[in-house]
Image (spheres, rainbow, N blue to C red):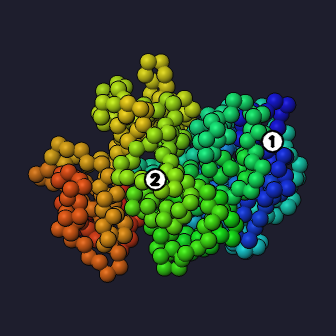
Amino acid sequence: MGDTLTYNLADMWEAISDRVADREALVCGDRRLTFAQLEERANRLANHLSGLGLGAGDLVGCYLTNGTEYIEALIGSFKIRAASVNINYRYESDELLYLLNDSGVSVLICNEEFVGRVAEVADRAPTLRHVLVVGSDGPVTADLNGLPDASDYEAVLAASSPDRPVVPGRGNDDIYVLYTGGTTGAPKGVVWDHGNCFFGCTGGGDPLRMSGPVTSPEEMFERIIDFDFVFYALAPLMHAAAQWVTFMWLFCGAKVVLHPGRFDPVAIWKTVGEEKVSAMTLVGDAMARPLIDAWDEHGPFDVSSMYSLSNGGAPMAPYLVDRLREAAPNALFSDGFGSSETGIQGSRRFGPGEKIGDEVRFSNVESGTVLFDEFGELIEPGSDKVGRVAHSGYVPLRYHNAPEKTAEVFIEHDGRRYVLSGDLGTAGEDGSVVLLGRGSTTINTGGEKVHAEEVESQLKSHPGVYDAIVVGVPDERWGQKVVAVIAPVDGSTPTVEDIDAHCRGKLASYKIPKGIVLVDEIVRSPSGKADYRWAKDVAEGGAGN
């Protein structure tokens, strides 16, 4: 940290961790780290990376499941003005190779279980020069042949200096890189600078959106909480929401619990009670539904410590929100919206007993959020006209190595720079925004626009539907017809007629699926986002009957 404190994420981390050094910072499985211990491990990694020649603008790949090593990699990279690259741990060889080469990472940190996959592609990734391997259970035992300059992660840390590196020039302009999931196209790297990221992604020192953002870096010291507060991050750290909210709470001196391994809903509920979790963030239906199933089958669990339950990163069906609030009736429920490109744009909040309703209206919206029509003109709030959601103010710099895509998504209007989120919505006179879903998932049937997420929300309230994705398939009469890919509840076989009867009166007739395809399981990303490309292939192959 230099003489002048900035909004640089490493500066912010060091300033806060010095003041709460003895507090627990991270819990993941059996490992528990204080702020001082996490700081030391991040310093050791930073010094090793610096010794390899990494510095400002260099990229470190994280091909990791949840663990303290992920946060160490983020902080360690920031310390030397480098940046981490999040890599989906479900990627197979070709997908991994694409991301290594698109990002140009020079160092890759990976779990031992992924060594074979990395070895398959390493010789075709010319920028990759070093690999650090995180052992599955103790020292690494896997064969590291075929990996460039490979080392055991823990051995590297043990051999490196614990001293805080002194790095000239660190400041608000350093970069933070976050790759999107690519559920509707190839993954793209979103490049933020730290100053905009601090406010746009990590809340500007206001994780609960109650006090407003800080007006100076030094004001963050006043935001350090003086009571026990535990945040539980359920999503994988490769997901934007998990990274952002983790740092929101670390910057306030709170403890963060990471969920290790596979999603285990019973273990999650037990952890809430054991760790006295104050706040927990989910990502959409893919997390909410199994948590409710576990509650019904094995509950109730101790949730008396729960102050806040939130959702972000993917939509959650209203009936699932209601069930979660029944499980934790004293918790404030918060639903957030935003994207890797926009940061956190808004939220809606419900106190105990408040009804959520079927409309997805966000009343707490960041200034700078607007809607553009199809001609690139601003839509007047209150007009009920559907437009593309956009944001200005704290926004990223660009897409990494993608100037054409950058020009499409980052636009100027009346001398102001905006980023288009990909969402469609309407704007109320009061500044609220109603989200209708992603433009890429909109179905055009007979000249009418159908927003997939609106239909999915109704389908998931059917007693025989466990999960669902809605897509459009080619149709001679309608251009596209609405088809639902449904994972039914065990023992249930919903029909088109069942679905039609359930949706009548809730959806306009043209929105109701004209066909369904039943599957054993809906394919989603580890963060819970629906894979619409997969669903479209399934729907077209199943003919939607």
Along the viewing direction, whichever of 444 and 157 lies nearer the viewer: 444
- For this view, does 237 lie left or right of residue 363? right
The CA span between labels 2 and 1 is 39 Å
What mark, if any, has residue 354 been given in the picture? 2
Picture quadrant of residue 150: bottom right
- The residue sitting at 36% across, 48% down in the picture is 359
Relative image position of residue 416 (x, y in whole percent)? 49, 22
Task: Tell us which disc is closer to us: 2 or 1.
Answer: 2
Along the viewing direction, whichever of 542 and 16 lies nearer the viewer: 16
Whether residue 250 can be seen here: yes
- The residue sitting at 78% across, 33% down in the picture is 218
For badge 2, the amino acid type reads Glu
Along the viewing direction, whichever of 321 and 9 lies nearer the viewer: 321
For badge 1, the amino acid type reads Ala
Relative image position of residue 461 (x, y in whole percent)? 33, 64
Relative image position of residue 307 (x, y in whole percent)? 61, 57
Check the image and report above or below for 471 versus 436.
below
Whether residue 66 can be seen here: no
Tag 2, which secondary structure? Answer: loop
State the residue position of label 1. Answer: 15
Relative image position of residue 404 (x, y in whole percent)? 44, 34
- For this view, does 96 lie left or right of residue 21? left
Furthest residue to the top?
A: 414
Tag 1, which secondary structure? Answer: helix
Mark toward the start of the polypeptide (2 vs 1): 1
Alpha-carbon neighbours of circle 2 within 10 Å: few (<14), some, or many (≥20)?
Answer: few
Furthest residue to the front?
A: 353
